[in-house]
Image: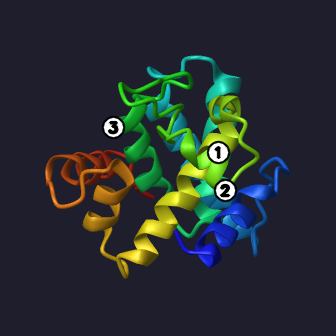
Amino acid sequence: MADSVRLALANAIKDARPPKPVFRDDASRQRYQRWLAQMSDRLKRKIPDDLSRTEFLEAAWYESSRAGLDPGLVLGLIQVESAYRKYAVSMVGARGYMQVMPFWAKVIGDNDRSKLFHMQTNLRYGCSILRMYIDMEKGNLYLALGRYNGSRGRPKYPNAVLGAWKKWEFHE
């Protein structure tokens, strides 16, 4: 990985402040509140506790928006990767909601792999990494998703995420 890419990713995950959404106007704030209510209803079965679900959705919206990603895409990816399990560990060692590989903690972080189970940290890493892959693939989401999963060129994973994304689209 080029030093410039490593530095950009490290800077993207460095800011550990909690998510504080900023809205340019009242209409944007109201749209966010409608999104939050709709997504909360959809996610109730997977995350039954109201407070935990709200905190998760606030962080997912914040981190996906911060990375320039559609929050529905991120929710779809999480559905496929971990089924919304915070402490999920894959057979190859990927961790947390977005199934971030532990080597990323060394490459762009402080080498503390345990932080990959911290909700906001996991979402920040995952969203930043996905954004990098989308940029590397010049906007080709299908190829970027394949890179994210390590299955570039094979259709099963990108198709699963794109299908799940449709379930998380926001309908006003």
Q: Residue at x 63, y 78 (%)?
A: 4
Q: Position of residue 51 (x, y in %)?
A: 71, 25
**Picture disc at residue 90:** none
When the figure is inspected, residue 99 is found, relative to residue 53, above or below; the finding is below
Q: Residue at x 37, y 82 (%)?
A: 138
Pointer 3: what residue?
Answer: 80
Q: Quadrant of the C terminus?
A: bottom left
Q: Earlier in the sequence, mark 2 or mark 3?
A: 3
**Residue 168 seen in render:** yes
The amino acid beneath tag 1 is Ala
Local packing at callout 2 (Cα closer than 10 Å; few below 14, some 14-19, many 20+) is some
Q: Nearer the viewer, mark 2 or mark 3?
A: 2
Q: Are marks 2 and 1 in contact (CB under 8 Å)?
A: yes
When the figure is inspected, residue 94 is found, relative to residue 171, above or below; the finding is above
When the figure is inspected, residue 155 is found, relative to residue 2, above or below; the finding is above
Left or right: 29, with 84 as reference point: right
The amino acid beneath tag 3 is Val
Q: Nearer the viewer, residue 9 or 131?
A: 9
The amino acid beneath tag 2 is Ile
Element at label 3: helix
Which of the 4 quarters of the picture holds residue 142? bottom left
Element at label 2: loop
Q: Position of residue 164 (x, y in %)?
A: 29, 45
Q: Are marks 1 and 3 in contact (CB under 8 Å)?
A: no
Q: CA distance from mark 2 to mark 1?
A: 6 Å
Pointer 1: what residue?
Answer: 105
Q: CA distance from mark 1 to mark 3?
A: 22 Å
Looking at the image, the residue that sits furthest to the left is: 155
Pointer 2: what residue?
Answer: 108
